Structure formats: structure tokens, C-alpha cells
Image (tube, rainbow, N blue to C red):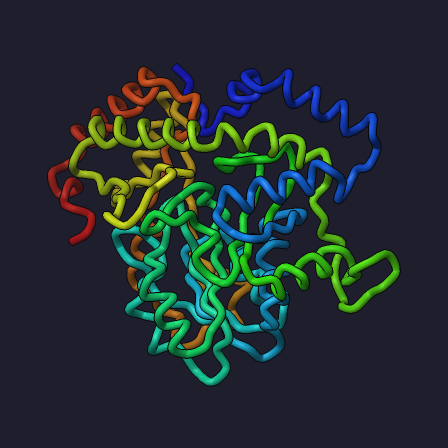
Amino acid sequence: MFIPFVDLKKQYQTIRAEVLAGIGEALDGMQLFLGQNVQAFEAEFARYCGAEFAIGVGSGTEALHLSLRACEVGQGDEVITVSNTFFATVEAIALVGARPVFVDIDPETYNMAPSQIESKITSKTRAILPVHLYGHPADMGPILELARAYNLKVIEDACQAHGAEYQGCRTGSLGDVGCFSFYFTKNLGAYGEAGMIVTSDPDIARKSKMLRDHGQDAKYRHHLLGVNGRLDEIQAVVLRVKLPHLDEWNERRRSLAQAYEAGLPSSLVKPQEMPWAKHVYHLYVIRTPDRDQLRACLEAKGVATGMHYPIPIHLQEACRGYRGSDAFLPITEKVTGEILSLPMYPELTAEEVSYVCDCVREFTESRPETSKLEVRR
């Protein structure tokens, strides 16, 4: 049996006719950017998130970059974030001339540990940028409380958390601004690159709209130095077709996660869902000190896996200049040496999950007892 890490073809077949019809209409109209589909999708996604405004951009990276600029974070400022994330989170901070300041993560959720934040706040701090990693929200309550106390902006990296909830509120609507990626493998994915800025702040919305379109509020009236960061009409068509299915697909992911939880051996550390959270399992990430050996075993048995992310950002060569007192993040460094992502997508079958679990159990039962110690020790 072969089980891919992600299978996009299965999902496409269920919506193919609607996608092709929508793309055909867009091409017939030939208004290929900032047209009726982009405008409609912005309204629909804002409503879905529980926010006032949504601004379509070209990628999740652009959403982060332009949100920082819209919040007036710039040269010489500091932004508190995490190292256990995709590189774009920190890349966006650097692109505006600010310095990323890293805090360690919570060992249960792998997200920003709120207890680590206050000691890193300085006179240069302008924002906190938590990441809702793997589909599980960060613990936003204490983060927002600290931000209010120190007059800081909160920019949510929700690029892996479409539809996830914190205390009943959807991610992206909790801070000053939320940033989403619609990279094709995401819970809500385009058929190319796309992203979204979500906010209920009219000033941030106004600036974001200008920044994505060369800084103009009308043709040839440039108020800011912006970029070409517009969401295109074709991707908006695809996303509009997919959005009504998102909750159903997320519930399917949650059901598959329960099957993994029941079928995988207890010697592994499995994903946790905090009482205040709704996890949407963009990724199903386990931990084991035998990660590399397990991955090789699964590959030999036809099970594709991933590692998100094996080298933390503060140890990347490109971030050498940002290493300071926050260069040692013990939990981050331990976790990133043990993480392994198992196949997770709504079209995965119960039989395929059972096969993956059987393969993992076979591996763990063959290991020496010393390798079966609880990973958290």
C-alpha cells in the first residue's frame, strides 16, 4: 500500500466541475485581478473569520509582511515571535527592517509560551507575532493581555489554522490583524499562491489595501510605497468554491486525528487539544526520539511523512545576525529533533490510517525498551 503525505487529486475530483465553470466565467470576463470574485471572497472570508475586513494578497508571506507594515512596524523595531515555525514568519519581520526576538514554546501545543514573553519586551518592542502552528491556536488570552499592558500590536500568523478556534472565536480575529496562507496544501488551499489579511481595524484595512496595490487608493494616486501583492481572480474562484466545504473538511481531519490517537502506541507523544482550543489538524505531528528511524521504516512500507520543521529558525544560517540572548531555546530545539508529520488530509480513509498505525506499532514494538521512554522526560 502507498499512502501519500497529501493527496490533492482526490479533493479536486469532488469539486472539479464547479472549479472549471468558475474559472471559465472569470476568463470570459477577463477582469483578472481585484475583480468580483476577489471582492466576494474577501467578504465571505471576513465573515467566516468573524472580522470586519479581509484583504486578498498574493501569499501568506505577503500577508505577514504587509500586516507588519500596516501596523507601522519598521526599521529598528523588535517583534516577539517563535523559532518553531516556517521561515516566512521571521522573513516578514526582517523584510520590514525589524528584529525578530525569539521566545520558547509550550511543550504541549508547540506554540508560543506566554510566560516567556514579558521578559523579552523592551522599549523597541512594537508587536507580538504568535503562530497557530499545525492547526492548533496559540494561548491568545495572556498574549493579548500583555499586548494591552505594553501597548503592542498582535499579529496572528494563522497560515496553518483556517477555522481553528480559541475560546469559541476563530483564529485571525483575535489580535489586531490575522494572516492566512492559501498555499495549495493548506486546509483551505488555492491552486497556486494566495493569502489574506484579516482585521477589524479600518485603518489597518485601508493601509493593507493600498500596500498590496503599489500604495495607491485609486489608479495613479500613490500614498505609500507598496508592492504588487494582489490576490488574482482565478485563485479567488477556487477559494470561493472551497470555502463552503472548509468546516466539513476540518471535521473530517478531526475525526482522522481521533483515529490516530486511538491507534498509535502510547510510547509516542501525540498532538494535544487544549480545553480552550479547537484544533483543525493542518498537520498531525507526533514526537519520538527515534524519529529518523521511524520515518525510514514508514517510507519502506509506502507511508510518506514530513518534518515541520527540523531546523529551528534561530539556528538557520540566514538568521545568524539575529542570535542574541534568545539564541538558546531548549524546548524548541528538543521538539524539532523529534517531530514527524503523518499523512493528514480529509480524503484519507480509515483503512489508510489503520495501516499507518499498524506500521508505527510494528516499529515501536521492535525497538529496545530504552527507546520507548516517555519523550517529555
Compared to residue 99, the image places residue 136 above or below, namely above
The image quadrant that residue 205 belongs to is bottom right
Residue 231 percent location from the top left of the image: 69, 44
Residue 93 percent location from the top left of the image: 56, 66
Query: Is 217 in front, or is 296?
Result: 217
- Taking the view exactly as shown, the residue that stands out farthest to the bottom is 123
**Total count of labels:** 0
- In the visual, does 36 lie left or right of 60? right
Residue 287 percent location from the top left of the image: 28, 43
Q: Residue at x 61, y 62 (%)?
A: 202
Query: Is 233 in front, or is 317?
Result: 233
Q: Residue at x 53, y 44 (%)?
A: 47
Query: Is 118 in front, or is 364?
Result: 118
Q: Residue at x 21, y 24 (%)?
A: 362
Compared to residue 105, the image places residue 57 above or below, namely above
Compared to residue 84, the image places residue 341 above or below, namely above
Query: Is 351 in front, or is 57?
Result: 57
- Taking the view exactly as shown, the residue that stands out farthest to the right is 220
Residue 350 percent location from the top left of the image: 32, 18
Q: Residue at x 61, y 43 (%)?
A: 43
- In the visual, does 192 lie left or right of 228? left
- In the visual, does 234 lie left or right of 367? right
Question: Which quadrant, please, contains the N terminus?
Answer: top left
